[in-house]
Image (cartoon, rainbow, N blue to C red):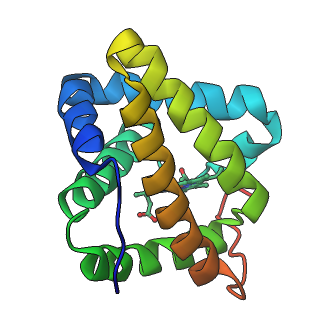
Amino acid sequence: MTVILEYEAAVRESWILVHDQGAVLTARFYENLFALDPALRALFTRFDEATRSRKLLAALDEMVLLLDAPDRLVSAIIPLGRRHGEYGVTDRDYHTGATAFLLAMHDVLGERFTVDADRGWREVYALVSEVMRRAGHGVTRVASSDT
Ligand code: HEM
């Protein structure tokens, strides 16, 4: 599989810059997500905030690490996409997630979130969410114990 990410270097640089503030980044991400679509809050019932944040950061770490190995990246994302299907995440939610994530990066990095980094993360999110969405299609939503 050939995937050319034009702004890979900018993505890696921005990830290094934001890394120390990972918890702030994820907090902003969820704030933005719930501000854009308050109904999404109801999907997040399984993990406490700290665990959820840690898991999201670990997944993003792995993705950035695998940007130059797209086959491995795709293999790593498929089970994650299936689980998101079980969580009830829809195509529309992935779209909302893109906005929430890009805004969060901008919130944390300010001017250090360059145009190239923004373009690069759009590319990465498009690739990752496409694979996750496809993997999640046809998966039955599994209600958590709280829902
Ligand atoms: C495309 C980027 C995304 C990545 C990399 C990502 C990553 C993760 C990870 C690593 C987890 C931890 C649990 C697991 O591994 O299954 C998780 C949980 C979850 N994610 Fe995502 N996610 C993404 C997008 C979204 C979007 C757009 C939504 C929709 C609102 C969403 C909703 C959820 C929910 C509901 C959970 C379960 C959390 C809970 O019940 O507390 N995710 N995500």
Residue at left 76%, top 31%?
Answer: 36
Q: Is residue 46 in view?
A: no
- Does residue 73 sit above or below 39 in this rendering? below
- Does residue 112 sit above or below 94 in this rendering? above
Q: Quadrant of residue 141?
A: bottom right
> Residue 39: x, y in percent?
82, 41
- 40 or 15, which is in the foreground? 15
Residue 131 horizontal side relative to residue 11, left or right: right
Q: Quadrant of residue 14?
A: top left
Q: Quadrant of residue 69?
A: bottom left
> Residue 13: x, y in percent?
20, 34
Residue 14 horizontal side relative to residue 131, left or right: left
Residue at left 18%, top 58%?
Answer: 65
- Does residue 125 sit above or below 14 in this rendering? below
Residue at left 74%, top 44%?
Answer: 40
Residue at left 60%, top 44%?
Answer: 98
> Residue 85: x, y in percent?
64, 73
> Residue 87: x, y in percent?
64, 66
Q: Quadrant of the C terminus?
A: bottom right
Q: Is residue 122 in view?
A: yes
